[in-house]
Image (cartoon, rainbow, N blue to C red):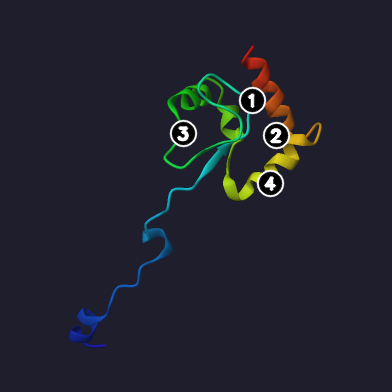
Amino acid sequence: MNETEKKQTVKKVTAKEMPQKEEILVYIGPDIPSVKQYTTYNNGLPDALKEKIKEHPFFNSLVVPVAKLARASAELAREGSALNILFRKADKTNR
């Protein structure tokens, strides 16, 4: 390929360079002030939830993509599962 052909070659855009669409997230933890269970967020998380995650990092596990909501809800309902344990732990921190 000569220099002219190289300049005319269109750069291929990789997946990393593609603009990322904001992922819609769902909070599946217990209600906390200003944040209700099963609320969806598409422009980032509210400050109240960010603060809770900063105080108790495990709250981040209770924020899931909408695409994984069905699986996460099933796990949440299963006694002794990781999400079920985290939910109960989160609920205790709110009291």
**Numbered label attached to residue 30:** 1
Mark 1 / mark 3, whichever is N-terminal: 1
Mark pair 4, 3: CA separation: 20 Å
Percent x, y of residue 71: 70, 46
In the foreground, 4 or 42: 42
Q: Amino acid at mark 1?
A: Pro
Residue on which disc 2 sits: 83
Mark 4 neighbour class, 10 Å CA radius: few under 14, some 14 to 19, many 20 or more: few
Q: Residues within 10 Å of mark 3 (few under 14, many from 20)?
A: some
Query: Element at badge 4?
Result: helix
Q: Amino acid at mark 3?
A: Leu
Q: Residue at x 64, y 25 (%)?
A: 30
**Residue at point 64% right, 22% down?**
90
Q: Which residue is mark 3?
A: 45
Quadrant in which the C terminus appears: top right
Q: Provide the secondary structure element on which disc 3 rests.
A: loop
Q: Which mark is residue 70?
A: 4
